[in-house]
Image (cartoon, rainbow, N blue to C red):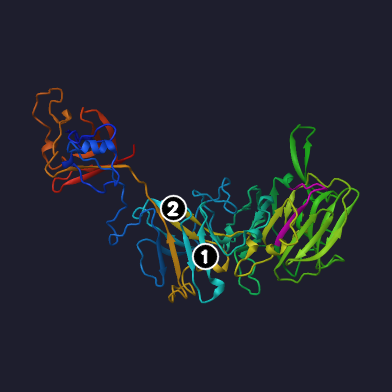
Amino acid sequence: MSFQGQNSNLTFTHKRLKAGDFTIRPFEVNKLWKISSIHPEVEHYQKFGIQVYRAFYPENHKYFGNVANISSSLYERIFTTQSLDPKILWYYLDHNYYTEYDNIKQPTFLTDDSQITYIAESASLFVIPVGVFGEGIKKKSVSLVNYNSNPSYEYTLVDDGFGNLRDTSFDETKIVNVDNCMMYVGFNEKYREYNMPNNKLDFVLDMAPHRNTINVYNKKNITYTPGISVSGSNTPTGVAAHISGSYFRVNPKLDFNFNKNDNFAFSFWMKKDSNQLDGINGRNYLFNKNLVKKVYNVNETTLQHTYEEVEKESSQYPFDISYNNHLSTNNGRLSFRQGSITKMIEVTSSVLSSDTWYHVLCQKSGSKYQIWLDGQLDGEVIDNMNDNVGNENLFFIGGSTNTSSLFYGSLDEIRVYNSAISDEQIPYLADNSLETGYAYQTSRVGNVFYNTGFVVISDPRPKYANAFLGSSGNFDYDGITNGFRGQFRSTTTFYEYEIICKIRRKEFNFTQNPSIRVDEASTRSNEIENYVTSSYFNPYITSIGLYDDSDNLLVIAKLANPIEKRDDVDMNVIVRFDM
């Protein structure tokens, strides 16, 4: 055994381990648990008075009334008051959540245990102190059941094992063509810009796996407002974009260059303003790929190569969705068109009211060109396109660089699919009921972060706005009428061996490190530096060595932080390891 100065090592040589089943002299062992079955070699050693212990790692039982939550056990409690619970703490966070946008992440459709979703307008946060009750949350173990006097607000949330917290009331078959969703813009990350007239960002997020870049032009003319309404009420959900002189550009444009034989669908919610600009030929454009293209030019004098955006309406385009204003013979109606050099196919909707939310689906399905309003087929033309419809034009939402083409109104929950949507599925996209709200096309309402012990409910639908906070969000619980039940399992690493090395008080208070001597080069010098005999000298333990009977070093345990050797109490250092 030797001590070296304040930053040096402590090595125990009086604790003996034997290769194979490590042996420890019995007077140096504090037994925790002894295994029920004894290995033959262990029995052999016991004949010679040598005790061998294989101890499992117990969770910390020193906190909160000696309550231990072993990983195989289930913690469960029905919450009927806002009492402090040592295992689950919960809070309501307003406008405070998560991290910056990362193109690698796919928070809308897929989450793993390291996933961090983008900001949400509000969140209910559960904190499980994993440092006390295990090392983390066991996957697929979290369950939260909300009780409410209003049945519409009752739900059960479960952890799916991938970091998603899902509402079990959702029918997953009503989640439409996830793999075929090429773009999803919901604006729900924009709540921070509600009151930012001069500091708005010049982009919105595409949360579909394709991760298109969507830039905002004339960003001062866009306002982010409460989103689409719950069916049959004026209660808003999430965030919508109100554009009044601004528009969006989508890149890369070629991903949306559907050919004449391709099926595709545009699903979106819109609320038009009563006043619109004159537009181009009486049209205010919602989605277009036929107005602007980039032209490659070479300056004959300087030979410089440039791209210029040229405004020129093309007769060849894969899609064009526009609102017909007062200058059009179809005033008040939507038009969905596709065109080639020789042919143009158009279907129109019924008249839309101003300041009213509509769900719109425009799609090409085989030879059918359709417009659906609020889940009902509203207009259809059956025809076949004979020529190519693809082009090199730019893809715009809400207008284009031609300011007279701009649409004035609100847009929300925009999705573009490279497939048609079945008649049975279209009503799901138009469903924003309080109980389900399939308009958001996900059963995921939050996240579980297994390693940190955080459970977050952040869905923008009103059903989850005051998740688990009582009937009105003020912790007004009333038994299980307005309360909730929470449960989880923790994870703990089990070690096959646990060796307790005891350092008794008044032992090992000195060091043989030659650096403490005044004459370090002399092995016979007994004169030591002044700091050694003063109160400033306190040996620290940084490493522990475990040896066999032949003094062969078998295990080296490195402490995460040095531990000061105290002289007023006995100290135990636990070394845990597997074989």
Numbered badge on residue 29: none
Badge 2 marks a residue whose secondary structure is loop
Q: Is residue 310 above or below residue 21?
A: below
3D distance between C-alphas at marks 2 and 1: 18 Å
Give residue 507's position: percent from left, percent from top: 13, 40
Q: Is residue 400 left or right of residue 231?
A: right
Give residue 505's position: percent from left, percent from top: 13, 45
Mark 1 residue type: Thr
Which quadrant holds the N terminus? top left
Task: Give whichever of 516, 104 is nearer the camera.
Answer: 104
Task: Give whichever of 466, 316 is nearer the camera.
Answer: 466
Task: Give whichever of 127, 80 is nearer the camera.
Answer: 80
Give residue 288's position: percent from left, percent from top: 77, 54
Question: Total number of numbered labels?
Answer: 2
Task: First in sequence, mark 2 or 1: give its number.
Answer: 2
Q: Do the numbered discs 2 and 1 sit on residues whose CB atoms are within 8 Å?
A: no
Q: Is residue 363 above or below residue 295?
A: below
Residue 148, can we see it?
yes
Q: Tell me the residue that label 2 is attached to.
A: 138
Decide whether residue 263 is among the magenta residues: yes
User: Which stretch appears magenta?
Assistant: 256-268
Mark 2 residue type: Lys
Give residue 342's position: percent from left, percent from top: 91, 49
Q: Is residue 220 above or below residue 49?
A: below
Q: Residue visible at 37% across and 61% down? A: 87
Residue 202, can we see it?
no
Q: Is residue 42 left or right of residue 87?
A: left
Q: Tell me the residue that label 1 is attached to.
A: 156
Q: Residue visible at 44% across and 56% down? A: 454
Which quadrant holds the C terminus? top left
Badge 1 marks a residue whose secondary structure is strand
Q: Is residue 223 above or below residue 391?
A: below
